[in-house]
């Protein structure tokens, strides 16, 4: 039972991270109907850029995080400008293949710059409360909440979950209360009509990419706090997050958040109780099942074939 | 594919037929010159022959993928799973059960076809992005099954070793030039069948589905049936390539069949121009050879690792931007 509680919390934390990435997929899909394969790579770049800012340029953690978000937002906008914008009116498959190409380029670029060696944030550079440990001799628990049954809940995980929730709420408010949010919703409904109404659609799309990429960068740093940072992390986590976006109904932001939590829980619980070798396979199976049985996702409007 | 005996075609045919001799000739020249202390830095003929065999397998796969991607216009991101199914079916049958290659090959193709149909059945109604995602997920599942189920392969990480070479009339086909003619025959067969299909009622139905599925259906084309046929033929060709590569490589393992391999084959089809058999083959020949040349340690330093994928990515992006119809002269 204690193990179940701990697994459940781990699943929630992972789910929060997935939700942050999934939002990036779903926002872009909602507006330009493109599966932005490169989003997973932007997420990976977020982790690497923060790591580089901290380890190479000795910038404090608190500044490195927003700096990495900013850099990733610029990267996302750059990709949109260079690769996707010229293909706005091309066949959908062209844009999808371009997205795969970008993904290949970014992933291998990361491998060339930072090598395939797994890296972590150096412990001494992180704020103290993010590093939790249990002193084996005294049994003293540092920076973590003891759970009933012997497990611990590190402050780090609490922070990740809280930050994910705060960012989600902020995004939700942004989309529903601000002018740019309104423009984004308008573009998602009908891009041509919004253009005719005087909305600068290209700018709106660029902002969408920027927001999605910045959230992806945060998620990358969150993953980097507890796991290794590798050039392939964007691919593996990206696909799981994409599964979350599909599960929630692609194009639906609230759905992506809930889908992220569900995929995170399913992955952690599945790895714990079924087989750890099939950890990612669970996300794939959910994704295939959702697409085949209910393509509009759990929370999407059951519109006709979107693709 | 205009069946004309122009001098160009005859020369091309002769080169294809006697390529191993040419390679032995290169080996001879290199050996001869090295006696006099002259080293040209050419790779050996045997090595080049191996690259050509490998590129031929890619040609076969590209032709197979072109059926789904080019003719019916559905983006298949998991084509490598049929390659994997063919490779492991043939490999396990031969290495672990001692089945002859000549039995294992058709069984592998059959197995691949079955999975092509099984994968096709739930995806018949899907188009575009959703089809691509399901095919991708499907391939990843197979990848993981082979990696995790040790009882199937007998070793972790899908390491299957000691796949025997095929034998016929007491001759073991394990030389590179054996494999060259072997793949040449298979490739010719595949291209012939695909070509005949393309220029038949079936091929026209596929293109009609690509252009407008609803219109095709209303013209009386049984869309489900023709799509299933495309999936089956495409999967069979992939499995055939897998079965061949299993005996050619002697040992296979899972990383050989990862997602990026699918993308590489897709890249070949796109480079040559989707929907053209000749284009797919030319694309595969270019990228297949380029891929070998760009392997780490040859031109690109080791520390850069798989920089070739970086180049493939750039090729994809540039093609989509400037020449969506591929290298072929036709504009898409």
Image: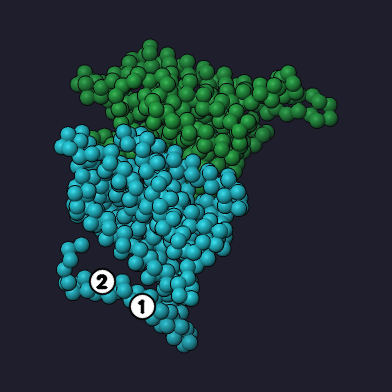
Chain colours: A green, B cyan
Residue B31 x/y as whole percent: 46, 83
Q: Is residue B243 above or below residue B213?
A: below
Secondary element type, mark 1: helix
Q: Nearer the viewer, residue B53 or A147?
A: B53
In this view of the protein, which residue sits in the foreground, A77 or B115? Answer: B115
Query: Is the residue B35 above or below the residue A152 in the image?
Result: below
Q: Position of residue B74 (x, y in %)?
A: 30, 41
Q: Position of residue B83 (x, y in %)?
A: 43, 52
Q: Nearer the viewer, residue B199 or A13?
A: B199
Is residue B7 at all visible to an observer of this figure? yes
Q: SS for tag 2?
A: helix
**Residue at point 38% right, 16% down?**
A175
- For disc 1, the neighbor class at 10 Å (few under 14, some 14 to 19, many from 20) is some
Is B258 drawn above or below residue B212 in the view shown? below
Q: Which comes before the other along the chain, label 1 or label 2?
A: 2
- Image point (26%, 60%), residue name: B192
**Residue drawn 41% across the image and 19% down it:** A299
Disc 1 chain ID: B
Q: Which mark is residue B12?
A: 2
* Residue A38 as seen in the image, left or right of residue B9: right
Q: Quadrant of residue A89?
A: top left
């Amino acid at each position: 039972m204690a193990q179940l509680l701990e697994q459940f919390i781990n699943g929630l934390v992972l789910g929060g991270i997935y939700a942050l990435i999934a939002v990036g997929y779903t926002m872009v899909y909602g507006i330009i109907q493109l599966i932005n394969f490169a989003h997973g790579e932007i997420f990976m770049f977020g982790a690497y850029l923060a790591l580089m800012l901290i380890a190479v340029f000795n910038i404090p953690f608190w500044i490195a995080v927003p700096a990495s978000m900013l850099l990733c937002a610029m990267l996302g906008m750059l990709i949109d400008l260079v690769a996707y914008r010229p293909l706005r009116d091309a066949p959908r498959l062209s844009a999808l293949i371009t997205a795969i190409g970008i993904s290949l380029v970014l992933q291998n670029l990361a491998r060339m710059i930072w090598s395939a060696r797994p890296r972590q944030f150096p412990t001494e550079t992180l704020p103290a409360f993010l590093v939790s440990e249990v002193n084996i001799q005294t049994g003293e628990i540092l920076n973590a909440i003891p759970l009933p049954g012997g497990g611990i809940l590190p402050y780090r995980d609490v922070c990740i979950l809280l930050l994910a929730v705060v960012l989600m709420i902020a995004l939700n408010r942004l989309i529903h209360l601000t002018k740019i949010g309104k423009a984004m919703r308008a573009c998602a409904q009908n891009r041509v009509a919004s253009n005719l109404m005087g909305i600068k659609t290209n700018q709106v799309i660029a902002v969408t990419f920027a927001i999605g990429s910045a959230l992806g960068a945060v998620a990358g740093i969150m993953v980097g706090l507890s796991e290794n940072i590798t050039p392939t992390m964007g691919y593996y986590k990206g696909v799981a997050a994409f599964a979350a976006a599909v599960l929630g109904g692609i194009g639906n932001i609230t759905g992506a958040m809930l889908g992220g939590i569900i995929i995170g829980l399913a992955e952690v619980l599945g790895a714990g109780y079924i087989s750890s070798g099939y950890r990612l396979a669970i996300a794939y199976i959910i994704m295939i099942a959702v697409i085949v049985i209910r393509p509009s996702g759990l929370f999407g409007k059951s519109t006709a074939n979107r693709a | 594919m205009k069946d004309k005996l122009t001098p160009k075609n005859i020369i091309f045919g002769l080169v294809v037929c006697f390529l191993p001799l040419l390679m032995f000739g290169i080996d001879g020249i290199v050996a001869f010159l090295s006696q006099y202390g002259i080293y040209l830095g050419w790779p050996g003929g045997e090595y080049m022959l191996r690259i050509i065999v490998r590129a031929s397998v890619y040609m076969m796969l590209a032709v197979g993928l072109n059926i789904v991607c080019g003719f019916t216009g559905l983006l298949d991101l998991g084509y490598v799973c049929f390659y994997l199914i063919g490779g492991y079916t043939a490999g396990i049958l031969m290495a672990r059960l001692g089945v002859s290659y000549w039995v294992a090959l058709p069984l592998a193709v059959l197995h691949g076809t079955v999975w092509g149909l099984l994968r096709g059945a739930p995806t018949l109604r899907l188009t575009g992005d959703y089809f691509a995602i399901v095919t991708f997920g499907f391939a990843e599942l197979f990848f993981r099954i082979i990696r995790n189920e040790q009882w199937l392969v007998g070793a972790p990480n899908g390491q299957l070793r000691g796949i025997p070479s095929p034998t016929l009339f007491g001759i073991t086909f394990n030389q590179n030039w054996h494999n060259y003619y072997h793949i040449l025959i298979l490739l010719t067969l595949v291209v012939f069948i695909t070509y005949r299909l393309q220029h038949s009622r079936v091929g026209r139905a596929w293109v009609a589905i690509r252009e407008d599925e609803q219109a095709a259906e209303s013209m009386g084309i049984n869309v489900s049936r023709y799509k299933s046929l495309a999936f089956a033929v495409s999967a069979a060709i992939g499995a055939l390539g897998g079965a061949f590569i299993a005996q050619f490589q002697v040992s296979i393992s899972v990383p050989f069949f990862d997602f990026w391999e699918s993308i590489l084959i897709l890249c070949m089809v796109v480079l040559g121009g989707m929907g053209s058999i000749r284009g797919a083959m030319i694309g595969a020949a270019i990228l297949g050879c380029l891929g070998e040349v760009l392997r780490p340690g040859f031109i690109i330093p080791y520390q850069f690792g798989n920089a070739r994928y970086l180049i493939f990515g750039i090729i994809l992006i540039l093609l989509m931007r400037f020449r969506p119809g591929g290298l072929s002269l036709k504009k898409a």
